[in-house]
Image (cartoon, rainbow, N blue to C red):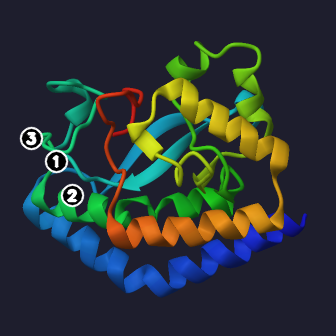
Amino acid sequence: MIRRVLDIVGSSTVLLLSAPLLALAALAIRLESPGGVIYRQRRVGLHGRSFDALKLRTMVQGAEHIGARLAVNADDSRITRVGSVLRRTSVDELPNLVNVLRGEMSLIGPRPTLPVQVEQYSERQRGRLEIKPGITGWAQVNGRASLPWSERIELDLYYIEHRSLALDLRILWRTAAMVLGGSGLYKGQSGGWEGEL
């Protein structure tokens, strides 16, 4: 209950404060390329329930059907100029706060994954679905998409087993540092999973 209250207060506050920035970003997206401002992608959350994760669109319309499809790298030609800035600053993730308000996500937890990813989980890895997915998490601040997928899952499972206020504060602090530094945004040579549009 306490976490839910913090999720509501935190997400509402950030959405309110970032409203002018979101409006400016939405205008820039519309001016640069045709298509909707919000990108929706089906993800799996708590106990395997599906929901539509919301993000600002950072790629050309229909990017998931073009070229590398769900795989995204730093020099991906499908990323728009505005989208590049939004990704580097993580502003594109702000609509996830609406998912938090809806109760589909939390501020902190494993990133929500695609149904096809969940289908490949082992029994142990399914433990990742025991809490709500988050906007940021332990795997996000310890290598993010540069890590092999199996390592990211292990980091998420570590968080679930050791979840505490102290660990949450540590994650928030490191998330802020990552956003300001713009590091770890794309999958590296060692891994990542094709599904981070």
Viewport quadrant of the C terminus: top left
Tell me how far mark 3 sits from mark 1, CA to CA.
5 Å
Say which mark, if any, is on residue 83. 2
Indicate the position of residue 149 as horizontal and vertical percent values.
50, 27
Quadrant housing the N terminus: bottom right
Residue at 24% x, 25% y is: 69
Q: Nearer the viewer, residue 136 or 27?
A: 136
Residue at the disc numbered 3 = 77
Q: Which residue, as the protein is rendered here, is positioned at the far right? A: 1
Amino acid under label 3? Ser
Q: Which residue is mark 1?
A: 79
Residue 53: give x, y in percent of width and height.
Answer: 51, 46
Q: Of marks 3 and 2, which one's residue comes earlier in the chain?
A: 3
Instruction: Out of 169 and 87, give the one closest to the viewer.
Output: 169
> Seen in the image, is 127 located left or right of residue 120?
right
Q: Residue at x 49, y 72 (%)?
A: 176
Question: Which secondary structure, mark 1?
Answer: loop
Tag 1: residue type?
Ile
Q: State yes or no: discs 1 and 2 in contact (Cβ < 8 Å).
A: yes
Res 111 → quadrant? top right
Alpha-carbon neighbours of circle 1 within 10 Å: few (<14), some, or many (≥20)? many
The residue type indicated by label 2 comes to Gly
Task: Kindly indicate whether the residue at mark 1 contacts the one at mark 3 (C-beta within 8 angstroms).
Answer: yes
User: At numbered mark 2, what does the secondary structure look like: helix, strand or loop?
Assistant: helix
Q: How far across and down, in percent of the image, does residue 121 sit?
A: 64, 16
Residue 45 visible in this rendered orientation of the protein: no
Dot 3 surroundings within 10 Å: few (below 14), some, or many (20 or more)? few
Quadrant location of residue 168? bottom right
What x and y, as percent, mark residue 79?
16, 47
Q: Can I make out residue 52 in this image?
A: yes
Mark pair 3, 2: CA separation: 11 Å
